[in-house]
Image (cartoon, rainbow, N blue to C red):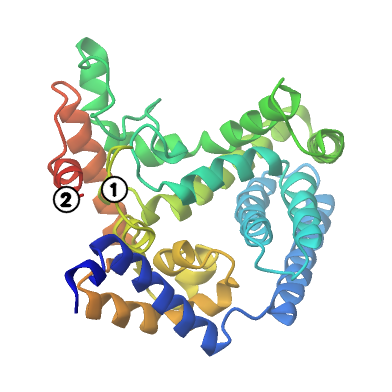
């Protein structure tokens, strides 16, 4: 071959993903799964109706708190359904997917579809990129130290050094955070597609839900019910999403890496059977989801062996672990980063990618 005709490493990497995409499309796994999604939606609506009936039946009983915990888990499942619609997994029509996401996220979940779509799209484009991925931005928790402007000192240093130990308790507040973030977006000055529709649906959900709770229960029990429901919702949401990327490599915004490797190297799969898949809404196949975000979630299990073998053939590290082990990794990672926040360091992996252009 003439040297001028040699394929550059970057073109070869791009062709790797094209090769995988062609192979996956030939399997037919990208086809819509209407029966699965309509059945799933009907089941969730039936369970929700059952929860409402139980709330009415129990009335002034502290057993309502058990219902509240189950309701938090059920609303998490609705959120997964909205996630799939937002990724264009359910319908061929983009318009149908948009409206499905609006109804499920805003009316059932009380969240903002517009807020979530903007945030989640940036995450998929740049997973684990420091200062860019919204899920990696430092805030209450310090996820990375390369963008810290100054070391943590005093009581902040003591707390952040142990932040991994606080991670799961903090998830109990995530439900409130999700609702507040959505409302701030809808009511904010930034552009929001279908702002009026979002505000109407979220208002019906939040106001109607709170009113129903206090009509069915005394004030004290009502507040306890809301606290348990919001706490369980935030906990289950965080416990489902955290294992996917936390503790995986992070890179700086100037790192040059192709799409296939960016998505695979920064993502972690969780094995453990169908119950794990149900608990995580199919997001336990995170590698495959990031490579093919519009693939229906029930097909991710089927495409996994092909992707795993392809990565092995190309020498790309494919990470998979158990759910419990992933939680240990997240906690240890947060504590390690927290200790480093006292003296921010340059991540060796970031330096490696930056030098390998």
Question: Is 265 left or right of 289, judged from the image as shown?
Answer: left
Q: Image point 67% across, 63% down: which residue?
A: 88
Secondary structure category for the residue under label 1: loop
Q: Is residue 356 visible?
A: yes
- Rendered location of residue 1, percent (x, y): 19, 79
Residue 276 image position (x, y, % from top left)? 45, 69
Q: Is residue 345 left or right of residue 307?
A: left
* Residue at horizontal 46 percent and vertical 37 percent from the top: 134
Q: Position of residue 354 (x, y in %)?
A: 19, 43
Q: Which mark is residue 220?
A: none
Residue at the disc numbered 1: 256
Q: Tag 1: Cα neighbours inside 10 Å, few (<14), some, or many (≥20)?
A: some
Q: Position of residue 100 (x, y in %)?
A: 78, 58
Up the image or down, 294 lies above or below 86; here it is: below
The quadrant holding residue 293 is: bottom right
How many residues crowd mark 2 within 10 Å: few (<14), some (14–19), many (20+)? few
Q: CA distance from mark 1 to mark 2?
A: 8 Å
Question: At 35% from the left edge and 30% from the top edge, which residue is drawn?
Answer: 141
Q: Are marks 1 and 2 in contact (CB under 8 Å)?
A: yes
Residue sitting at x 34%, y 72%: 16
Q: Is residue 317 visible?
A: no
Dot placed on the residue nearer the N-terminal end, 1 or 2:
1
Residue under label 2 = 356
Element type at marker 2?
loop
Quarter location, residue 294: bottom right
Residue placed most toward the observer, 193 or 60: 193
Indicate whether 117 appears above or below 272: above
Q: Pick whichever, 315 or 344, lies toward us.
A: 315
């Amino acid at each position: 071959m003439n040297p001028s005709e040699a394929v550059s490493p970057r073109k070869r990497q791009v062709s790797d993903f094209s090769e995988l995409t062609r192979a996956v499309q030939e399997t037919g796994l990208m086809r819509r799964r209407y029966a699965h999604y309509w059945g799933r939606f009907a089941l969730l609506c039936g369970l929700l109706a059952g929860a409402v009936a139980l709330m009415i039946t129990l009335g002034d009983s502290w057993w309502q708190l058990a219902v509240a915990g189950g309701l938090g888990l059920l609303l998490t499942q609705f959120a997964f359904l909205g996630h799939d619609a937002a990724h264009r997994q359910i319908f061929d029509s983009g318009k149908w997917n948009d409206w499905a996401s609006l109804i499920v996220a805003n009316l059932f979940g009380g969240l903002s579809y517009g807020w979530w779509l903007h945030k989640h799209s940036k995450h998929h484009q740049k997973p684990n990129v420091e200062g860019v991925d919204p899920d990696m931005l430092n805030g209450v928790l310090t996820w990375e130290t390369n963008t810290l402007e100054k070391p943590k000192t005093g009581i902040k240093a003591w707390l952040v050094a142990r932040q991994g130990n606080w991670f799961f308790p903090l998830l109990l507040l995530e439900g409130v955070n999700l609702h507040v973030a959505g409302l701030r977006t809808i009511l904010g000055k930034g552009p929001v597609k279908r702002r009026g529709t979002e505000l109407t649906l979220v208002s019906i959900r939040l106001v109607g839900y709170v009113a129903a709770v206090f009509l069915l229960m005394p004030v004290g029990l009502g507040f306890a019910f809301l606290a348990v429901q919001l706490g369980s919702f935030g906990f289950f949401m965080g416990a489902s999403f955290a294992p996917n990327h936390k503790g995986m490599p992070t890179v700086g915004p100037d790192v040059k890496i192709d799409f296939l490797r960016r998505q695979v190297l920064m993502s972690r799969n969780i094995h453990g059977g169908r119950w794990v898949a149900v608990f995580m809404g199919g997001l336990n196949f995170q590698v495959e989801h990031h490579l093919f975000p519009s693939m229906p979630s029930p097909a991710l299990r089927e495409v996994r062996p092909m992707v795993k073998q392809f990565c092995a053939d190309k020498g790309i590290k494919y990470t998979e672990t158990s759910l419990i082990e992933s939680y240990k990794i997240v906690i240890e990672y947060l504590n390690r980063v927290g200790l480093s926040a006292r003296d921010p360091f340059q991540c060796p992996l970031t330096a490696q990618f930056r030098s390998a252009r």
